[in-house]
Image (cartoon, rainbow, N blue to C red):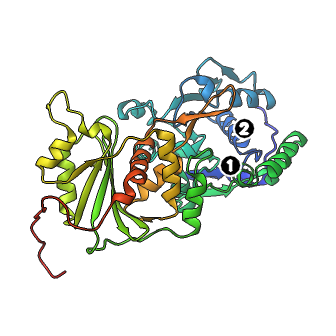
Amino acid sequence: MREIEAQFPDKLAFLFEPARYKVAHGGRGSAKSWGFARALLIQAAQQPLRVLCTREIQVSIADSVHKLLSDQIAALGLGGFYEVQQTTIKGANGSEFVFAGLRQQDVNKLKSFEGVDRCWVEEGQAVTKKSWDVLLPTIRKPGSEIWITYNPELDTDETHQRFAVKPPPGAVVVQMNWRDNPWFPPELEAERQSTKERDPDGYENIWEGKPRRAVEGAIYLREMDAAIEARRIRPVPYDPLLKVHTVWDLGWNDSMSILCVQRSASEVRIIDFLEDSHRTLDDYVADLKERRWNWGYDWLPHDGATKNIQTGKSAEEVLRKLQRSPQIVPMMDVESGIKAARMIFGRCYFDEDKTGPLVEHLKRYRRHVNKQTNEPGAPLHDEHSHAADAFRYLAVVVDQMKNDDHGRPIAYPKPKGIY
């Protein structure tokens, strides 16, 4: 194999030194993905390597780095060495590049990647904890390496926390932005300046690689920013002198989301959050009972009064039989509910430990955007919308949450010890 002449940004020199984890994160135009592709192709030309190129979701080969690698093969003059096939890339020495989406793989399928020498995870900001927990132990061949590139989205994203905020032993992590690219083109410079003038908040994320406080287009973007600035995400202890009201978004296959809320004058204290699926109502009630709190009402959405076809009972009836105090949230269209939610945000305090998942859902709750017109539409129905719906229901009934006794008393046994 002849010598390969190639140029790299100075910050990517570490790609040619052994390390278990090699991570580059930052903004647009930094040449990090370009450099990773180039380095992998050079190393795989020098010795036989099996390279897995992956990301969280890959619907087709067009979603992968296949095209980027193909372009770099041409740029490096390696067209005679590599054979670019429709779904793989093969080298004359036996090297092979394969492509897969993590979310589409189960544990058994991932086992086929145990012999991988290099694993390149592109768009790493989208990779979930579940995917990392499955992938990392799979890449186990002696001397194997995991390469990661990403533009950070939120500072609380799993990938950013796992590899940049608290990197594991054996990790080399660099931040790369446009100024680290010696070949940063004038066309991108014009775009960078335009973004800086047009969208200064977005500029910091897009070009300087700084994580956002909420995802781009988040419905509650400004409200979440204000909550963080005002330190309203902090320890919020239970007050035994106040009732704890619950607000439910019902689900079985989808997530069941339950907010635990206390009112003190105008303050709305969200002290706990439950979320799960495929569990019965009595199971959730058992979880709530363990908290032994001073309970108020359980607020259910309008379908809480609808009888279940299998049981013949509504969620409202079931909770009442379980000695809870269910109430139905008045009907309100989604957009009016979102407006109501925005109005109460400034009154809300979120317990930073117990309601962390709720806060993350609210940061990621966004609208569907028409790809042709780029116009925002209705809120997306996804893994974040259930908790956001429960928060919307809270906004509808928050002023009905009182601290006086009501209905039939709920007599739970008192815990041992002194209050």
Residue 38 - label: 2
Q: Is residue 142 visible?
A: no
The front one of 385 and 340 is: 340
Q: Quadrant of the N terminus?
A: top right
In percent of width and height, residue 320 lies at: 15, 48
Mark 1 residue type: Phe
**Sequence order check, earlier mark of 1 and 2:** 1
Mark 2 residue type: Arg
Q: Is residue 221 visible?
A: yes
Q: Residue at x 56, y 23 (%)?
A: 60
Question: SS for tag 1?
Answer: helix
In percent of width and height, residue 196 lies at: 81, 52
Residue 196 - label: none
Q: Which residue is mark 1?
A: 16
In percent of width and height, residue 318 lies at: 15, 43
Q: Residue at x 45, y 34 (%)?
A: 103
Question: SS for tag 2?
Answer: helix
The front one of 287 and 391 is: 391
Q: Residue extending furthest top?
A: 86
Q: Residue extending furthest bottom?
A: 418
Does 381 sit left or right of 148 as displayed? left
Give neighbour class at mark 1: few <14, some 14-19, many 20+ (Cα, 10 Å). few
In the displayed structure, 62 sits above or below 297; it is: above
Locate residue 291: give its quadrant. Answer: bottom left
Q: Residue at x 29, y 36 (%)?
A: 303
